Each structure stands twice: as structure tokens, then as C-alpha cells.
Amino acid sequence: MRITATALVAFLLLLCGAPQAFADGAMAGADIHVAQTLGARELTVVLRRVDAVPGPLRVNVITHAGSQPGRLSLRLVPTGVGSVSGPRTESATSVELRDRPGSHDATLTVSLPGPQELVIDNTARIPFVVPVSVLSPAERVTYGGFVAAGVLLFVSLVVSVKARRSWLALVPGGGVVAALAVAVTAALLSASTPAPPVPGEDIDATVDNVLDPYSTRPQSTVDESRPPVNVLVSVQDGVELTLRLVDGASGRPVDDLLIHDSALAHLLIVPPSGALRHLHPVRVAPGEYRVHLDAPEPGYHAVSVEIARRGGGVQLLRSATGFTLPGTPRPAVPTTETVRAEGGSPTTITARMSEKRDLQPWLGMVGHLIIVGPLPEEPEVGRAAASSATWSHVHHMAPLTRGGAGGLPDETVAAYGPEVSFTHTFTSPGRYRAWIQAEREYSLMTKPVEIVVAPGKEPR
Amino acid sequence: MTRGRWVAVALVVLLVAAGGFVLLGGGGGGRVELNSSSARHSVRLVVERARVGTTAMEVEIAGESTVEGVRLEPVMHMGHAMPLAETAAVGPGRYRAENVLLEMTGQWEVTVVLRDSAGTERVVFPLLVS
């Protein structure tokens, strides 16, 4: 009997000492990069990954060439709805922007997990979610099983030594085997357990579903996509542009934008001269975005906005109205280069934007190509762009860094290029206007290009 | 069988049932309580039954309330806005609307609109209907 008990104990110890097969909880969160056109400055705000709650939130504010020095106030406001009511502690600090472009650091304190807003200069409100690392039910069962096995092992040892009847030791011994079986099974299954919907990305985030994402089960029968969005454009004082985003079905303000390509909304404005503006309006209220137009041009401006809604993909919103500023329009800026392409098959457009590998990723990409066309015969580029059939936005991706924690490299990494290339298929023949954008020495370069597309030979 | 054995069998059955309850989450009655705050008010929304069908909803406003009226605007995120629901005062700082229709499962949003002498405030509550 003793030998059997010893063998059983030895076997169990061996099992406990075996390499652990269960996966660790997913790394909670990644860095969040948000481009913000705040006043006359184009800023990139990087919210670093939060490792512990309560804990610090490191914020980097990256300025660009020609950015004015000054002080920005930063405030972190917990905004999450939850089943527990309690005081919400805000955290505030300020960051001094130097006259030299680069990263400026600040630290805030996160007091609660879940939805938060970072308020910059009492104007821009960036919504984001502070996640917490949560064990899946399978992982919890695994840990519970191993703990139970450990406790029962101790009990079985005590019983086998103390009990008068030898068979009594088999009861906790059997328990050890059962607990281990449960733990190992759960560990093996944990890898294949479906991930719960991500609060803030798939479903609306609340404090409760961030703390326990497994409490909300994926509902396979429900269509998660949300309606398209209408954009209403208005201008105040000739320089302040307001965009109101309203739901295409309910007419309510749209306040569920995801940060995609490092911004909540990418605003593209084509003025009469054709000098493209690629701006990132700041969210001032639910569904209301504002942007300051530096040195605005008179005349008609074509407007489009790229957004992504929670539960849906990226949408391109083209404003049917655009906006007009009083005055005589300037003549069109000539393009520097003409590229020939053929319709119906992929064309690769390459541009050399620097002499060496020193391009910086802007909005997470090494290069951007924005194309509008085919353009009608019209001297004002803004009007021509507004009536052209397609607006496209092509990226040259930054290569992914293997093993890099936190995600994307930020703009302080000047190691890309010098060539950027884009592949695009033009559907219709005609004359297109395109802009190639890349960042170097914290300055955004925009190269206007004309693309002439010949009718394709390949039948489609 | 002896009495002791019956007790043991009952215990095992109870343990299995409890385990099943813990693993499957129980279900519950679908009552949801959510807290949020606007610039001037701290608001709690109680949804009696966050399931498909009609439910009562109650709004509680903490502290000295200057609120004159409360209405609810339920919207389903797939794009279905429901008719707004006016509430009736049922106590100090408590407003209730009976028979609010939640038409289908999924992500909903209930906007609580508070009216007082200083203006109108909106507090948005995400609500998952199962």
C-alpha cells in the first residue's frame, strides 16, 4: 500500500513539474497614436500602453517643423459607464512644447480601467479605452485545477500517514487525478477558446465589460455593422471648419469612431489651387469635429473624410456641398511630374522623397498617395475634384518590427525610404491629380503629380 | 443504502449543479444597473430586463436635483431609433418609464436627456441586449 501511495505521489509531482502548457493572458493594450490638428499645430499624440491600473499613463506629444512653442494642458477624464458608482478621479498635467520639433513627454495617472477621454487644451477630447489583463474562463479553470490538485495532494499525504484504513487515502488521491485532468483539459482547450468581443472596438466599452470581457458573449446572429455616416460641413469666421457626423439611419450624432491609421478622422480638402490639405480634426463634442484652417484660400473647396465606426469598416465620406470662402480663387498649382498608367490593371507609382533612408512614418505609414479623378475640364481644382468619380487613398506601409512591444514605430524613427511606392488600379481612363505625402525631418512633404490613364487593353 | 451514502450522493449532485451554474453563468433576470455622470448630474439607469421585449427603465439622479423632466431615447446601433420614452416622476430624483420596447438583441444605446433651468444635458448609456 505504501509503495502504491509513494508511486502515486511521485507521479503527481512529476505532472506538476512538467512544462506548463497554458497560455498567458493576452497582453492588454498597445500604444495609441492619434494625429490632431489643434489650432495651427499638427500634433501626433502617442498614448503609451498602460501596464497597471491605477498607474501611470505616459503621453508623448510629437510636434512638427515650424510648430509654435507653447504650453498644452492635458487632462485625463474617466468617462466609463459602470454598475458601480463612485468618485471619478481626474488627472491633469501640462506639457511644454519647445520650438524644436520632436517628442514632448508628460505623465498622467489612470485611476480606473475602461473608457477615458484625454482632453487637450480644454478643446480636443480623444476617447480611448484602458484595458486590463483578464484571464479567460479556461485559464481560470486551469489555475483552479492545479491549486485544487496541490491542496488535495497535501490532504492525501496527511490521510495516507494518519488514517487507520488505507483505502481512505484513495479518496483525496482520486481528487488529485480529477483536478489535474480538469486543469490539463482546460489548458489544452484555452488556446481554442474564442476571444470575447473587444470593448471599444467590437462593442461599446463600459467599465464592466472591460473588467470582464468574457461576460459579454459574442452574438453570432447579430449583424454588428453600423449604418453609413453623413458629414455636414460648415465654416465659422473663414478659418474654423466644423464637421458634424450624423448616423445615416437614426440621424443621431456619431460618437463611435475608432482610431484608424492613427487618427479619428482623416480630412482631405482640395482648395481651388489644388494644394491638398490632409488634416485631423479634433473631437470637441460627441459627433462634432473641428479644425483650424491655416492661411485659407478663397473659393470652392472639395471635402472628404475617412472614418471607421465601431463594428464596421472604413468609410469615405464625400461632402456633397464642400465649402466656399469669399474672394477670387487662386490659379491652380502646376504638378511637378506626369505619370502614365493604363486602366484596368495594377499600376505601381514610385517617388523618391529623400536622398537617404531618413523618412519618418506619418500616421503609421511611410507614404500616402491621394488620387482624385478622372478630372473634368475645369480650371479650379477644388470644383474639378468635387465632381470627379473617384477619390482614393493608397499607403506605403512601414515594415512591421518583429518582437516590438506596443506596436507601431512612432515618428521619432527616421529609418525608411527614400523611395515610396504605391500600387493602384485605375478603373476609368482620364486625367487624375494625385499627391504623394511623406515625412522627413518632422516636416510633411506633399508632391503634386498628374496621372494620365490610358484605356486598358485587357478586357475586364 | 445507508443514510450516509444518500447524503454523499446528494452532495455530489449539488456540487455538479453548482459547478454547472458557475460555468454557464446562471443567466439571471437581465436587470442592468449603469452609472454615469454629466457635467452637472450623477445619473443611474436601471433597466429591469435587458432582454428582447418591453421593459421598465428607471432613472435616478443623485443629490439635490434641479431636474424638471427626463426622457429616454433608445437606439439600436444597427440603425434603428425607437420612439422617445417620456418618464414620470416616481420619487425625489427618480423617474420611470414603463414599456420601453427593445426590439432585438445586440448593442443598444439609451440616451438619458435631462432638462433643467440651466439647459439640457445628455448622458449616453451603452446597453447590451441579449
Image (spheres, coloured by chain):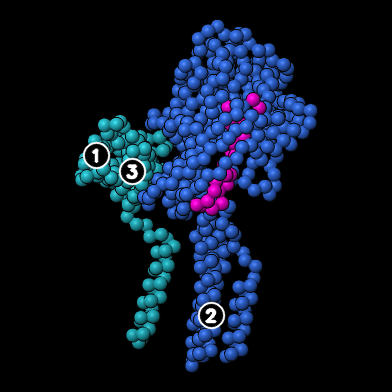
Chain colours: A blue, B cyan
Which residue is painted at 62% across and 8% down in the image? Answer: A331
Q: Do labels 2 and 1 share a chain?
A: no
Disc 3 or 1, which lies upstream in sequence?
Answer: 3
Looking at this rendering, what residue extends furthest in the top direction?
A328
B81 relative to A357 in the view: left or right: left
Q: Residues within 10 Å of mark 3 (few under 14, many from 20)?
A: some
Regarding residue A308, the answer to whether it shows in the image is no
Which residue is painted at 47% across and 18% down in the image? Answer: A235
Q: Which amino acid does label 2 sit on?
A: Phe
C-alpha gap between disc 2 and disc 1: 60 Å
Which residue is painted at 54% across and 17% down in the image? Answer: A302
Mark 3 falls on what kind of element?
strand
Residue placed under numbered mark 1 in the picture: B87
In front here: A238 or A434? A238
**Predominant secondary structure, magenta span:** strand
Measured as percent of width and height from the top left, residue A307 is found at 52, 31
Residue placed under numbered mark 2 in the picture: A154
